Amino acid sequence: MRRDKKDEEEGRASLYTGLEKSTVLQEARVFNETPLKVRRCTEILTKMLVILGQGEQLGRTEATEAFFAMTKLFQNKDVHLRRLVYIVIKEMATVAEDVIIVTSSLTKDMTGKEDAFRAPSIRALCRITDAGMLQSIERFMKQAIVDRSPPVSSAALVSAYQMFRSSQDVVRRWSNEVQEAVNSDSVMVQYHALGLLHQIRRSDRLAVTKLVQKYSKSSLRSPLAYCYLIRVASRLIQESSSGQDAASFEFLESCLRNKSELVVYEAARAIVALEQTSAKELAPAVSVLQMFLSSPKAVLRFAAVRTLNQVAMKHPAAVTACNLDLEQLIADSNRSIATLAITTLLKTGSEASVDRLMKQISTFMTDISDEFKIVVVQSVRALCSKYPRKQAVMMTFLSQMLREEGSYDYKRSIVEALLAVIEDNPESKEAGLSHLCEFIEDCEHPVLAVKTLHLLGDEGPKTMRPSKYIRYIYNRVILEVPLVRAAAVAALAKFGALHAPLLDSVLVLLDRCKLDTDDEVRDRATFYHRVLSLRNEQLASKFVLQPMQLSVVGLEQALLRYTQQSADSLQQKFDLRSVPVHTRPPGQSRTSSCRRPSLPSSRPSRWRRRRIATPSSWPPCPSCQRWEACSRAPSRCVSPRRRPSTPSPVSSTHSATTCCCSSTCSTLCQISGLRMST
């Protein structure tokens, strides 16, 4: 310790930084020297563990040479050196060849009198032993399971648990020894033995039921064993046909009176997690959790309030009795506990307490992590549907959270909460749209900006003053990445189609968008400008407001094949019936989760390369995102030089994939200048 502090003060580099695999393997030759330098060998073994832990892959020859050199370290009796040897053997067991050569040395240490060698040697031996060789050490394993030394017994039980995956028949023969180990006085041995015994019997439901009944009546000494038994009993209740098991549930209730706080909490958590439980059955568990709320231990308070927060989602009435204790936790020094307490109160409290709780939670929102901020947002979202008259207060709170720094998941949860409020309450539409407009002015997540622009295009023209949203949308055309600019163009076109007084202004803006550097934006602007300039409401409704049911990828590939035909084949009309139909999943709402991660804005070329793979949750181009004819003169078709990102042909001969909207396709081809055969 002194040497480490001295090295740190002198600015020396750490002994284990910047290690190279070749250098460490060359240093491993020290293992062959005589006399053996224990300190030096210990440092080299530690370096080997460091490079293996950093992900370095050793070649089979390199690992084998280092392994055989390391076997000579068994001649030394130093405890620290020997324990490092055991660890390195486990790490190289799957890389080096002929690792079974150390079986005799490990067996000797396993059956020796030195307890410091016996437990780690068992773990190393079981790591290098395969299913065929397990029977040769079966006698030693049985003796180790019932050994008086707790570390040796635990090592044997854990190793048997791991070997059960590959050698179930052999391990099942050790059931008598495992049952004897369950009665051990050691806490860990009892826990490991119970886990292995359940693993052996888990395929037989009747045997598992008898296991729970037997040990629920006997007094286990290990709280960990009790917790494991509680989880087994809870699983039995959930897997039962009726969802109820009187004996198992009675055991869970009896654990609520255990002297161990760990067991009491585990039992309460298991009861409240059951699906088919009544308020009467939940009452004992909630009472126990309420007692933990006033515990001096922060970990118990956190566990209790977190569990009550989950219970409040399904059974808010059952948690109402804990409101007084939860309000006292609002001032807790642990911000995580205070956050969970307030979100629980938001789910169980009255409408009159909403304002007070929102003010209290605003004071420390900057001090908690994004994970707990998302919990707050979800609680506020649920509260908006519960108390519609408080939506103005809660929308203001959500807008303030939008202005703060945060991760993509945090921002997405806020945006989806605002979208849900707008859909549920039309009166709050304009306020919600205003908050979202301010958000996209400084949004670092393109996916969320696209989602917001799509909403503005749908709902903005229906407001009292649609013109005020044009500025926010056109700013995105000037300042954002191609993906967002394309979505902004689509939103502008919807304003022109839905609000006639704005049509001339929208056409001017779309005409400017034709000069964009990205072909996706230019294509959309050209197509929308052509459709809207015809001033035909029917066409605008079909191609601007209603997305076409054509597969974008299939349409591009069909057009590419058409332009690559011979001159004689080009005399034939383009057949749109060869393009497969693409439909949006039914019931998809605007607030559905967008799981796509935030993408960087510094690589616009990436969007140009992958623009045809736009997910359906993003605002689609109403006509086609890859029609090159839309950006050209009406008499020209798609240039064969333009290669799609997925050029492989797609067969679409099935009747279910045939385009049935022939009139729509015909009109579109007339606009773009293509000939069509239907």
Image (cartoon, rainbow, N blue to C red):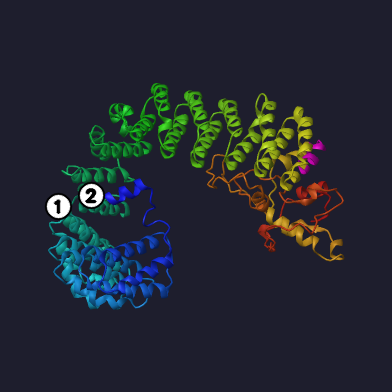
Position of 341 with respect to 376 (left or right) is: left
Between marks 1 and 2 in the image, the one whose residue lies nearer the viewer:
1
**Upstream in the sequence, badge 1 or badge 2?**
1
Label 1's element? loop
Nearest the camera: 623 or 102? 102
x, y (%) of residue 377? 45, 34
Residue at (14, 62) in percent of width and height: 149
**Span shown in magenta:** 526-536
Q: Would you say residue 580 sits in the magenta stretch?
A: no
Disc 1 crowd, CA 10 A, few/some/many (<14, 14-19, 20+): some
Residue at (49, 40) in percent of width and height: 407
Q: Is residue 203 visible?
A: no
Does residue 348 sit above or below 192 in this rendering?
A: above
Label 2's element? helix
Nearest the camera: 622 or 145? 145
Position of 306 with respect to 519 (left or right) is: left
Q: Would you say residue 533 sits in the magenta stretch?
A: yes
Quarter where residue 675 is shown: bottom right
Residue at (34, 73) in percent of width and height: 67
Q: Which residue is mark 1?
A: 221
Residue at (52, 29) in percent of width and height: 399
Q: Which mark is residue 246?
A: 2
x, y (%) of residue 178? 18, 65
Q: Amino acid at mark 2?
A: Ala
x, y (%) of residue 103? 26, 76
